[in-house]
Image (cartoon, rainbow, N blue to C red):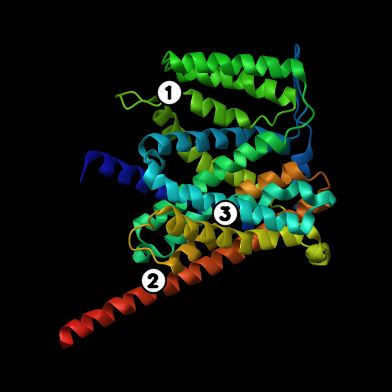
Amino acid sequence: MRKGSADGSRLFGDFFESERNSALVLLSCVLFALVLANSSLGLRIFSLLHQDAGLSFGFINIDFSIEKWINDGLMTVFFLLVGLEIERELYVGELSNIRAAALPIVSAIGGMLVPASIYMVFNLGTPSQNGIGIPMATDIAFALGAISLLGNRISLNLKIFLTAFAIIDDIGSIIFLAFFYSHSITLGYVVISLSVIALLVVLNRTRVKSLIVYLGLGVVLWYCLAKAGIHPTMTGIIIAFAIPYSKASYNPSFKLQNSLNVPVAFLILPIFAFANTGIVLDAGVLRNLSSPYAAGILFGLVVGKPLGIFLFTLLGVKLLGLRLPAKASWGQIFGIGCLGGIGFTMSIFMTNLAFSDVEIVKNAKIYILFASVISGLIGYAILRGGSAKSRMDGESKEDVVEAV
């Protein structure tokens, strides 16, 4: 085996293991938040998230609640890690080879366009049409956590395929977030933000490798974007791509990614999950099941995701001459597409940006959880059944050979 392939397999193995363990922690936090929110302590505990925690000194003024620090502050670090993972994939991972990356790219496009289209079928012209981005994303941690339950029944190539199109989903969601979920723009801070970005580009091109410099400028950029009316979490992606990726002995991008993997997976995302799923379950959740946004989220994730991924994968193979992952069947591709309907982190994040009505936000998060659970169970059942059938077919062929 070539050294590059071995390194790529090791990197993916580490990434897969981290995401699988993170999924277990996330699930525990979601269940704990739901139980706590529906207990006698729920209102008292979760009301603390809305307490003012703003900062003000000199000309700097940030009027944030604790919840907003979690969603706009801590999640910037999450986006930084996502950006570093995308950068790594572009240099040494599945996306570094355009031929290998072509099918996941095509599949991911279908996995974004079809759910978004289904959402708009239900919501076009309604106050909730702004939630179009909610069913577009795949939660990598939960999707890989679900597929890990199948053990060796699923090939490494299929796991890599799932990871690749989920990462491309993230890219699409981030672009969507930047263009459609920004508020009224303050021109002065936009100019300052662009100046900081220009300086980051210069530092990248001159191969400056000091992480302190990039992270320090990241803090400045985060503040300016927040004041400009552009969602400040975009800072994470910008800084990730500004940090040079190197195959030399010192790789600042890879070093920072390694440093962030554990705190993001086991601290930041669990805090985000806990803060955003402490929801009181009441009759309103069922009453609003017939609402346009509920239908858009449920059908978008449960139906749109697998349909879009499967159809665009089929088109890629039949019309563009692309190849399925080795030993993959069409049934497995559909099952992987169902796992793509596990939205969670990015879908909840989009919900917070799309809606201002507290009741709609609460209900939408519940529908995302419902849809993610349903998608995960269907995907797991299809993949488990398909792998069992493959083993039975293999055993039957062996029996025929022995009989001959």
| Residue linked to disc 2 | 387
Mark 1 is surrounded, within 10 Å at the Cα level, by few (under 14), some (14 to 19) or many (20 or more) other residues, namely many
Q: How many marks?
A: 3
Q: Earlier in the sequence, mark 2 or mark 3?
A: 3
Contact? badges 2 and 3 (CB < 8 Å): no
| Residue linked to disc 1 | 244
Q: Earlier in the sequence, mark 1 or mark 2?
A: 1
- In the figure, is residue 163 to the left or right of 175? left
Any part of residue 311 in sight: yes
Classify residue 68 by image quadrant. Answer: top right
Q: Residue at 84% across / 47% down in the picture?
A: 357
Does residue 165 lie above or below 58 as drawn? below
Kind of residue at disc 2: Ser
**Measured Cα–Cα span from mark 2 to mark 3:** 23 Å
**Measured Cα–Cα span from mark 1 to mark 3:** 31 Å
| Residue linked to disc 3 | 111
Kind of residue at disc 1: Pro
Classify residue 51 by image quadrant. Answer: top right
Q: Earlier in the sequence, mark 1 or mark 3?
A: 3
Q: Position of residue 183 (x, y in %)?
A: 77, 32
Which disc, if any, is residue 352?
none
Does residue 381 lie above or below 160 as drawn? below
Q: Position of residue 134 (x, y in %)?
A: 68, 50
Q: Nearer the observer, disc 2 or disc 3?
A: 3
Q: Residue at 72% across / 47% down in the picture?
A: 351
Kind of residue at disc 3: Gly
- In the figure, is residue 108 to the left or right of 350? left
